Image: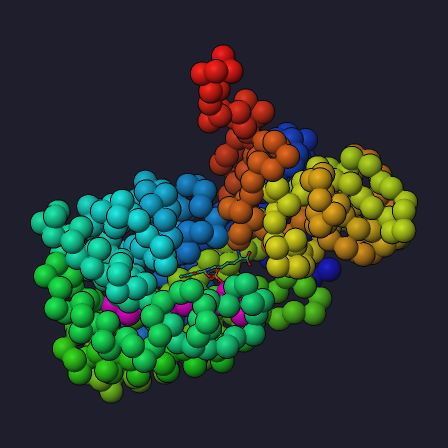
Amino acid sequence: MNLPPHLGVRDGHLTIGRHDCVSLAERFGVPLYVTDEQRIISRYREYRDALAAYYPYVQVLYAAKANGNLAVLRTLAMTGAGADVFSSGELVLALRAGIPPEKLLFNGNSKSIADLALAVEKGVAVSVDSLDELHQLDRVAGEAGKTARISFRVNPALEVPTHPKIATGLATSKFGIAHERIPDAYREALACGNIAPVGVHCHIGSQILATDPFARACRVMIRIAGELTRMGVALEFIDLGGGLGIPYRHETEVAPTPADYAAAVVPIFRDGVEELGISPQLWVEPGRSLVGDSSILLTRVNSVKKAHRTFVNVDAGFNLLVRPVMYDAYHEVVVANKASSPGKETYTIAGPICETGDLLASDRLLPELAAGDIVAVLDTGAYGFAMSSQYNSRPRCAEVVVSGERVSLMRRAETVEDVAAAMVTPDWQK
Ligand code: LLP
């Protein structure tokens, strides 16, 4: 199987960075998420350098929702990344990781007054999603004696080739303000006492394996930037969102590289802003394409059952990786302790959750499997642990990070006591 450069096979075992996955499973226990820090750093640099080759003022904002572990945020903070944060929690963790407030954008279609107040207090720009939110933010900023820096989230009404649940820029989607109403929204913002409109933002969808949709979105944003500039809005940034996909099917899918993305999008951006006589920063918000392939999920085989198909029952299910059941997503699997053995039988990898849909992978040709084998699910760095749950009262697993020779926990495994920790006994049950 085609493997990304940080994965390999040594003595029949799958490796991540310099580390043997079977040894990691033995040392830290399973299930286990393992992340390669160096892979994240090199993906970030690839992005930054690709964009900067065409335009000098660029800022990569990591989409913290993809993997919100503080160690991952810290890695990206140290390399110079900003962050797209979608909740107060993501905002607090991004700041704690050392990302400065001016490199953050608080996104989201449904922010509370407390969310808005936190953004104002910390001096974080807000991507405003509705006029109602605009006026709430104006009030909140006024009460704090501050000015809130904002962009509006543009709904560009673009159809994009991806799963409908993660196409975010459709005319019918819940996100943003329709592109034709955007000038009116900025007019309203300019009339507010405590609002400074300084940017404009969009996001068209996720797991997009072509560059053309991004080029189309960029053209829409340049047109809008022209309208706003003529209205007197001084744009400090134009944020084109994230969305570049990764090749989950290693044999057949090809994903555009950050260099392909930059070549398709940034010249349109650069020529557009030059023509307008402005030089705003170009912001992008990649999540999946920065961290997606940096992690694997290691899970142990509990039992093998021959039925109408051969099920391999493992100890991780959609409690730890919801993407297969939620989006019919495909993830490659490798038997970590038999990584050089040829495929022998067709297996379906089933999780331990009490639902028929709890399958991590269906009908895969794999080496002969037995209880105790370690199965690695690949490309789980984005929206993997981040979307995990404690369903079936299963404690969430540990996460480990490797970096060169080094290896460390970045999250300990939960215990059943952690599952119970926030539960409260009503008085009458005491
Ligand atoms: N910016 C905004 C405003 C977003 O809504 C998103 C993702 C991103 C950036 C990052 O997009 P990315 O570069 O990762 O495609 N849980 C789903 C993906 C949901 C994406 C939602 N928004 C999945 O597992 O496929």
* Picture quarter with the N terminus: bottom right
Residue 203 included in the magenta stretch of the image: yes
In the image shown, does 403 or 105 lie closer to the viewer? 105
| Residue 209 higher or lower than 303, as above or below | below
The residue lying furthest to the bottom in this view is 275
The residue lying furthest to the top in this view is 430
- At horizontal 43% and vertical 58% (from top left) the residue drawn is 44
In the image shown, does 373 or 358 lie closer to the viewer? 358
What is the x, y in percent for residue 40?
A: 48, 53
| Residue 415 higher or lower than 55, as above or below | above
What is the x, y in percent for residue 67?
A: 48, 48
In the image shown, does 412 or 338 lie closer to the viewer? 412
Side (left or right) of 95 relative to 428: left
- At horizontal 65% and vertical 69% (from top left) the residue drawn is 253
Residue 346 included in the magenta stretch of the image: no
Side (left or right) of 152 relative to 156: left
Magenta stretch: dominant SS? loop
Camera sees residue 71:
yes
The residue lying furthest to the front in this view is 428
- At horizontal 14% and vertical 69% (from top left) the residue drawn is 190
What is the x, y in percent for residue 129?
A: 32, 63
Camera sees residue 12:
no
Read off the magenta span: 199-208
| Residue 24 higher or lower than 284, as above or below | above
- At horizontal 71% and vertical 40% (from top left) the residue drawn is 354
In the image shown, does 107 or 345 lie closer to the viewer? 107
